[in-house]
Each structure stands twice: as structure tokens, then as C-alpha cells.
Image (cartoon, rainbow, N blue to C red):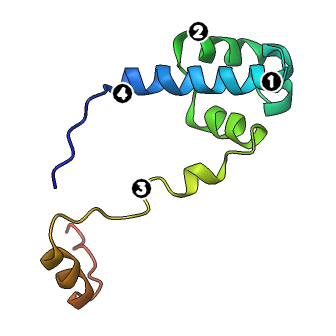
Amino acid sequence: MIAINIYTPTEVAQQLAARVKARRLELNLTQEGMAIRAGIKFATYRRFEQTAEISLRGLLQVAFALDALSDFNALFSQRRYETLEDVLNEQNLTRKRGRKHE
């Protein structure tokens, strides 16, 4: 099965920022309170909600503050298979190392 991306990275970032904002409001926190809880600068957090731009480290700190850091542990952890043959072939492979450039 081929996955079709229907969202751009910018759209995903905006949706993520909106979900974080909604969660912050559920917790009855101000932007400043959320920034303090996450251990990031207030301006950084405010920019994240407004533009969806934040460093990965900042996003992880926000996720930690919202008790959602474990969601990142699953990111990129499972390989997607297209056929049963792909699964069986991977089970038969031994781990290989890349070559060093000389």
C-alpha cells in the first residue's frame, strides 16, 4: 500500500501548534505559564503558537510539559512494509554495515 501525503509539512506544523494550544487552554494555562512549564522563553512559545515554528528541542520540551513526550518515541520507529514478501525478506537479512569512503 502506498501512502499518499495529503498535508504539507507546513500544514502538519500548523495543526500540531493548534493542538498544543488547545491542550494548553484545556489546562487553563496562559502562554507565559506554558512557556515556564516547558522551560522555554515566552517569545519562543508565543511564536510557536502564531507561526508553528519551533526548534525540535523546544517542541520536545513542550511535549514533556504536556506529558506527551512518549508520542515522539514511536516516531520513525516502525518500518512500513508494502508486501508480505518485504517482511519475510527483512527477517532473513543480517545486519550490514556501510562502506567507509577511502
Locate residue 34 relative to residue 68 in the image: left or right. Answer: right
Establish if 94 lies above or below 2. Answer: below
Upstream in sequence: badge 3 or badge 4: 4
**Residue contact at pointers 3 and 4, CB within 8 angstroms:** no
Amino acid at pointer 3 = Phe
Quadrant position of the N terminus in the picture = bottom left
Establish if 88 lies above or below 40. Answer: below
Circle 4 residues within 10 Å: few <14, some 14–19, many ≥20: few
Q: Distance of mark 4 from mark 2, alpha carbons?
A: 16 Å
> Residue 50 bears which disc, if any?
2
Quadrant position of the C terminus in the picture = bottom left
Q: Distance of mark 3 from mark 1, alpha carbons?
A: 27 Å
Upstream in sequence: badge 3 or badge 1: 1
> Residue 80 bears which disc, if any?
none
Q: Distance of mark 4 from mark 1, alpha carbons?
A: 24 Å
Q: Residue at 21% across / 90% down in the picture? A: 92
Rendered location of residue 36, percent (x, y): 86, 25
Locate residue 68 relative to residue 3 in the image: left or right. Answer: right
Q: Residue at 67% across / 20% down in the picture? A: 21
